[in-house]
Image (cartoon, helix red, strand yellow):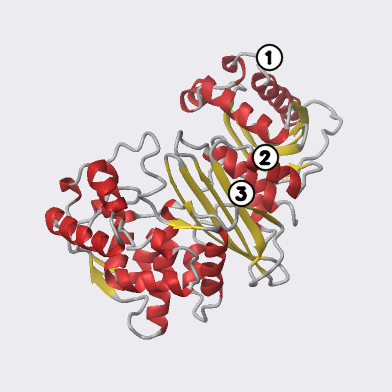
């Protein structure tokens, strides 16, 4: 999921210049207090003041000094040096939209003061690049440690991309693979094999992310609920339940039918619990990765008989460092994901697209730029994918898909998400 860069209170607004003050009242003096606090935020980020002089104890408990320093480093790496406060728009006596000027962008967000005038909430969630370009973004992507790819283009086949970097190369995509299950399910429903309101009994569990791993065995649930949780919060139990219902072979066929350029790299199509088990027991995982597809199928059957669907029977991976991300994962190129999204965009029934839109992963102020935003992402240490299906105001479909793999160290989601915001600003 695309996350805000800091904490608390997301609001949309445009900055305005500070107005001259009239006769003093409590309300009239609020803007100057807000301005002083915003200037304090700038000073802290630049290392000119101590955080405790500007931020409340509760804020610093949630966002300690080291995290503030990391925030400044990430923003400066993307947008250049922080030059100062651009402006504020008061939203009341203790709240304002603040605009910070960086060398190559204006960053906007919400600031909230507590009763003592300290900053208790700060959310920086909108960035307007200054003099940015596809070439500059491409250079920043190429400079990331490990390998990264971007494909931002009209969704139409053979369309000229707005930005493309390594877009034909296979990358580990994490939970973005769940879009293949969603697409296969939608096609079975269109064929009359299932229905969105069909009720099934929950008969398998996986490990987080998600919530359904805590639900009781046998809980009744609709296919629509399973699909919504699978996509919106990346629920692994919902995913494995749907994979069992749709069928591993049917999802593999959907992957092939979409025109995936290297299906053998992903097939057999793993459940989340199988992947956890293979990564937790690396001897087993390495033997699996070295086997042929037919041998892999037999190994998965033996694994299923051994664990009987019980997550407590697997060796759980620690997931603190990248683990076999080049061999035990789900893989796709930017072009592969564009081909899949073309199939989802073409579905007559809009339900799958509505499910993708539950968590759009775009800051609120930017959502008005599009008539539709659907999203799925995936991550584990060393792996990050962000994939959007977008429709502009003229009705044209677009895709933005970004992957970042580093087998040597975890990747930085915030840095990649800032790049995504810059890319989405290219055409707006």
Mark 2 neighbour class, 10 Å CA radius: few under 14, some 14 to 19, many 20 or more: few
Spatial distance from mark 3 to mark 2, Cα to Cα?
22 Å
Left or right of 402 on screen, residue 262: left
Would you name the residue on which mark 2 appears? 140
Which residue appears at 53% of the width and 58% of the height? 333
Which residue appears at 65% of the width and 14% of the height? 49
Q: Secondary structure at mark 2?
A: helix
Would you name the residue on which mark 3 appears? 363
Which residue appears at 31% of the width and 66% of the height? 243
Which residue appears at 33% of the width and 70% of the height? 223
User: Who comes first in sequence, dot 1 or dot 3?
Assistant: 1
Mark 3 neighbour class, 10 Å CA radius: few under 14, some 14 to 19, many 20 or more: some
Depth order, front residue of 175/150: 150
Q: Position of residue 403 (x, y in %)?
A: 54, 49
Image quadrant where residue 95 sits: top right
Depth order, front residue of 392/60: 392
Left or right of 99 on screen, residue 380: left
Mark 1 neighbour class, 10 Å CA radius: few under 14, some 14 to 19, many 20 or more: few
Depth order, front residue of 323/181: 323
């Amino acid at each position: 999921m695309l996350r805000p860069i800091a904490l608390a209170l997301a609001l949309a607004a445009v900055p305005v210049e500070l107005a001259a003050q009239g006769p003093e009242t409590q309300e009239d003096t609020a803007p100057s207090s807000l301005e002083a606090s915003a200037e304090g935020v700038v000073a802290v980020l630049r290392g000119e003041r101590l955080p405790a002089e500007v931020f409340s104890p509760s804020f610093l408990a949630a966002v300690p000094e080291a995290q503030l320093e990391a925030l400044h480093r990430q923003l400066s790496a993307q947008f250049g040096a922080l030059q100062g406060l651009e402006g504020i728009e008061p939203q009341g006596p203790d709240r304002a939209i603040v605009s910070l000027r960086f060398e190559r962008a204006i960053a906007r967000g919400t600031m909230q003061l507590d009763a003592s005038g300290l900053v208790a909430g700060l959310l920086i969630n909108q960035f307007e690049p200054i003099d940015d370009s596809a070439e500059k973004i491409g250079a920043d992507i190429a400079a990331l440690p490990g390998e990264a790819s971007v494909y931002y283009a009209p969704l139409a086949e053979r369309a000229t991309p707005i930005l493309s970097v390594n877009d034909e190369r296979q990358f580990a995509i994490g939970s973005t693979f769940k879009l293949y299950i969603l697409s296969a399910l939608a096609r079975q429903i269109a064929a009359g094999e299932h229905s969105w309101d069909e009720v099934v009994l929950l008969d398998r569990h996986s490990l987080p992310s998600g919530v359904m791993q805590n639900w009781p065995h046998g809980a009744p649930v609709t296919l629509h609920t399973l699909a919504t949780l699978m996509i919106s919060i990346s629920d692994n139990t919902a995913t494995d339940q749907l994979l069992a219902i749709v069928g591993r072979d049917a999802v593999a066929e959907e992957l092939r039918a979409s025109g995936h350029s290297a299906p053998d790299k992903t097939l057999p199509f793993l459940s989340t619990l199988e992947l956890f088990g293979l990564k937790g027991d690396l001897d087993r995982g390495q033997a699996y990765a070295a086997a042929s597809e037919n041998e892999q199928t037999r190994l998965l059957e033996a694994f299923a008989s051994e664990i009987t669907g019980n997550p407590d029977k697997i060796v759980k991976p620690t997931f603190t460092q990248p683990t076999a991300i080049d061999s035990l994962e789900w893989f796709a190129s930017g072009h592969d994901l564009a081909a899949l999204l073309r199939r989802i965009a073409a579905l007559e029934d809009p339900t799958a697209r509505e499910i993708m839109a539950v968590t759009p992963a775009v800051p609120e102020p930017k959502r008005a730029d599009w008539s539709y935003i659907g999203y799925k992402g995936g991550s584990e240490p060393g792996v990050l994918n962000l994939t959007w299906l977008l429709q502009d105001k003229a009705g044209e479909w677009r895709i933005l898909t970004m992957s970042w793999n580093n087998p040597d160290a975890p990747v930085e989601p915030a840095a990649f998400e800032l790049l995504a915001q810059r890319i989405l600003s290219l055409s707006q």
